[in-house]
Amino acid sequence: MKKDLLGLEETSTEEIKFYLDTAETFKEILSRPIKKVPTLRGKTIVTLFYEPSTRTRMSFELAGKRMGADLSNISVSGSSIEKGESLKDTVRTIEAMGIDMIIIRHGKAGAPHLAAKTIKASVVNAGDGAHEHPTQGLLDLFTIQEKKRRIDGLNILIIGDIAHSRVARSDIWGITKMGGRVTVCGPPTLIPVEIEKMGVDISYSLDSILPQADVIYILRLQLERQKKGLFPSIQEYIDYYAITKERLARAKSDVLIMHPGPMNIGLEITEDVATSSHSVIEEQVLNGVAVRMAVLNYLLEEHSPLKTGNLFSKDLVSTAPMRRSE
Ligand code: NCD
């Protein structure tokens, strides 16, 4: 039985679809005047963040609270926790307090996996190094599906700092599993060649591929993670890869503009594009709460149809949170 969500690489297409379906139900709950269901009453969740975060942490926190769980936040400042051993100790100590789930963000790839092996409680990866950020991947899939009614067959263009992006990796796994086609685009120094093995196309010329895109997914230029000299200058990056009003005018008339946040406005995206009618960046934030509710619900819910193998039976309906709260 699955207890963790560590990456979309190891998540099946069936599980992804299940998360997206249940997130739809939770999104409906979020539109009610009282945005609360008792699904996780009595469960305790800890967020353990070794890296700064505003939106992801708050999104998990709200998701848990909206389902009645008790939450506790632990922030760890970078330096003392680099060693695997101390991460193990930390999660063991937290588990000893009787919690059900730890949500971990860590600067090193694989940290949540180590935690998941160490404890019996559920572990959710909220971003590990440049490896994966599965709930961001799911909320992006949810947003694309909600707006386009499908993912299958769409051309999704991911632009920018692929090398440092855990979001790009989770999105690539998720989109390709759902039948979408991904092209990654950016300066050669920000695109690792092995990314091709994930089944994506690579392009260094934004202007030539822009007109075919159904979705333009813009990544933040992660200046804090980059060694100096990965591209000649910020201005050059803007000239070749920023999504501006002029570039948007050359894209499909129904193209979606997405960004995981936080944005560097005026760098990878201009203000007018971020606030244009094509932009679903704010929707992504709201959908993040719904998708995380679906993830917490599935991992902490013993009788989830995916766990019992009854995915296609009526049980799917009976575990739907809306039903239970009525
Ligand atoms: C992303 C992250 O931290 O990986 N942001 C997020 O989850 N809101 C992307 C980023 O930092 O650029």
Image (cartoon, rainbow, N blue to C red):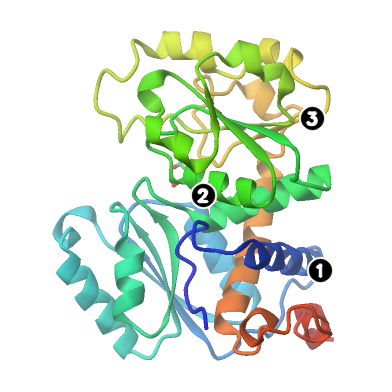
Label annotation for residue 33: 1
x, y (%) of residue 118? 29, 79
Q: Position of residue 156 (x, y in %)?
A: 66, 34
Q: Amino acid at mark 3?
A: Ser
Which of the two marks, 1 or 2, is nearer to us in this view? 2
Mark toward the start of the polypeptide (1 vs 3): 1
Question: Which residue bears the numbered disc 3?
Answer: 277
What amino acid does circle 2 point to?
Ser
Tell me the mark number nearer the camera, choosing from 1 and 3: 3
Looking at the image, which residue is at 76% across and 30% down?
A: 278
Q: Secondary structure at mark 2?
A: helix
Please rate how many residues cluster around mark 2, counting C-alpha atoms within 10 Å: few if below 14, some from 14 to 19, many from 20.
many
Tell me how far mark 1 sits from mark 2, CA to CA: 33 Å
Q: Position of residue 254 (x, y in %)?
A: 82, 28
Residue nearer the viewer, 147 or 70: 147
Above or below: residue 185 compared with residue 83: above
The quadrant of the picture occupied by the C terminus is bottom right
